[in-house]
């Protein structure tokens, strides 16, 4: 049985969607923290792969070098990836699942699948609370790294008073991530209510996998035909093209109903782009009302069965009036929001740096590898140390 200190990492980091990106960020954080790492790429049915794939079976487990396994894939895929394992095959390892969720209570079958794991890591307090409600194992918040980026050239020009035209709002989403959760039609309605067909203001919508939602595709095509200031970009594009979209943005918009973390929001903030977003769920890990335009909401039930959500699940319904006000406010008070966005960028790049996140991982893994033993920190203290006030402030 493997006893070396390090991590066997299983995940889909070669895909460009949110799950793949999150896995890649965690690999970077582990490596930066000096954690020894063996990587095993996992294929997913819903995302393009490189052609390499790992089958998790007893034979593979017997060849692993390290005691700790970190499995980063959706909880709903546990039966798929573990179907070839014999009973007890994971015994002797310390097994961590890195999971996300977007609703306050996880499905019962997710909770049952915790039997394969010794603890769960997750990216936000929102997710941590949801998992802990059903968990009989530790749930540990290990947020995602927010990558260090320079402000975009457009933002720098705006900061110098050289404002670019048209004033451009951007939103990015994947249909597979649930278009109703991403709430794109709400965002479009709020934009149109705020600006109508004003040619000086533009909304860019980047959407992937739109071909899998015929109704939404029809709606977006009709909207684009009737509103010249709305542009819809479909399909997969390379990372440099995604970067170009952020380079074109004056404001990023995500009026979602729920997020596990909110990578596109943090991506925009790390570039100095002001954001409008729902003040609910995982993005509140890094969004603050002092420097992000948080739209108010009411909680509601999903109301119908969906691929990942049940009708009784809870998510947020942003307030339309406040969303319209947010669009107008960012447009009319943009210099103020540029300053706020700059503060937000500085704040998150420090709090979610590779050093901070990697340090949390290294610290937790050290505890695991020491079998949660703790040295006494009282031996060097004197029992008669003062408990009185030391700083008198001149009184």
Image (cartoon, rainbow, N blue to C red):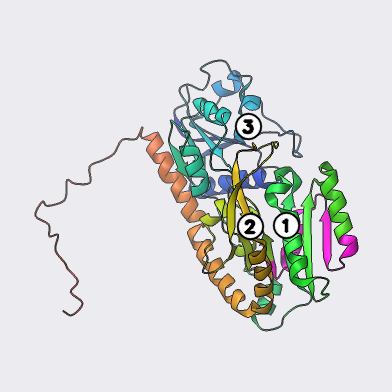
The span picked out in magenta is: 224-251
- Which residue lies under the disc numbered 2? 318
Earlier-in-chain disc, 2 versus 1: 1
Q: Residue at x 50, y 65 (%)?
A: 347
Q: Is residue 345 above or below residue 254?
A: below
Observer-nearest of 367 and 182:
182
Which residue is label 3 attached to? 76
Q: Secondary structure at mark 2?
A: strand
Give the mark, 1 or 3, whose residue is nearer the N terminus.
3
Residues at badges 2 and 3 in contact (C-beta under 8 Å)? no
Q: Is residue 87 above or below residue 159?
A: above
Indicate which label's residue lies in the foreground, 2 or 3: 2
| Residue 231, position as x, y percentages in the image | 83, 62
Q: Foreground: 83 or 33?
A: 83
Instruction: Mark 2 and mark 1 in contact? Answer it, CB < 8 Å.
Output: yes
Image quarter for residue 226?
A: bottom right
* Residue drawn at (66%, 41%) of the image: 303
């Amino acid at each position: 049985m493997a006893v070396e200190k390090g991590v066997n990492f299983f995940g889909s980091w070669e895909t460009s969607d949110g799950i793949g990106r999150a896995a890649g960020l965690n690999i970077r954080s582990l490596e930066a923290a000096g954690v020894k790492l063996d990587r095993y790429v996992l294929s997913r049915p819903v995302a393009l792969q490189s052609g390499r794939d790992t089958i998790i079976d007893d034979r593979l487990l017997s060849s692993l070098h390290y005691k700790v396994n970190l499995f980063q894939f959706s909880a709903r895929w546990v039966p798929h990836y573990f179907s070839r394992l014999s009973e007890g095959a994971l015994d002797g390892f310390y097994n961590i699942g890195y999971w996300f969720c977007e609703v306050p209570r996880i499905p019962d079958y997710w909770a049952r699948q915790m039997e394969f794991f010794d603890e769960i890591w997750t990216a936000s307090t929102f997710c941590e609370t949801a998992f802990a409600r059903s968990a009989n194992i530790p749930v540990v918040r290990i947020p995602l790294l927010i990558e260090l980026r320079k402000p975009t050239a457009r933002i720098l020009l705006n900061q110098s008073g050289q404002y670019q035209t048209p004033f451009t709002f951007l939103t990015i989403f994947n249909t597979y991530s649930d278009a109703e959760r991403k709430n794109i039609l709400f965002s479009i309605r709020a934009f149109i209510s705020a600006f109508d067909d004003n040619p000086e203001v533009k909304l860019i919508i980047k959407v992937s996998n739109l071909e899998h939602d015929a109704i939404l595709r029809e709606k977006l095509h009709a909207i684009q035909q009737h509103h010249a200031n709305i542009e819809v970009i479909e399909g997969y594009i390379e990372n440099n093209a995604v970067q170009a979209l952020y380079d074109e943005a004056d404001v990023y918009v995500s009026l979602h109903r729920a997020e596990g973390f909110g990578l596109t929001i943090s991506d925009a903030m790390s570039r100095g782009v002001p954001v409008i977003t729902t003040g609910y769920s995982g993005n509140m890990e890094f969004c603050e009302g002092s420097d992000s335009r948080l739209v108010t909401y009411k909680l509601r039930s999903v109301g119908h069965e969906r691929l990942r959500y049940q009708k009784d699940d809870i998510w947020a319904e942003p307030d339309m009036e406040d969303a319209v006000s947010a669009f107008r406010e960012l447009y009319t008070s943009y210099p103020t929001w540029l300053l706020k966005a700059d503060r937000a960028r500085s704040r998150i790049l420090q709090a979610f740096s590779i050093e901070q996140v990697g340090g949390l991982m290294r610290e937790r893994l050290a505890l695991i590898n020491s079998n949660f033993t703790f040295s006494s920190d009282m031996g060097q203290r004197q029992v008669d140390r003062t408990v009185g006030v030391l700083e008198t402030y001149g009184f």
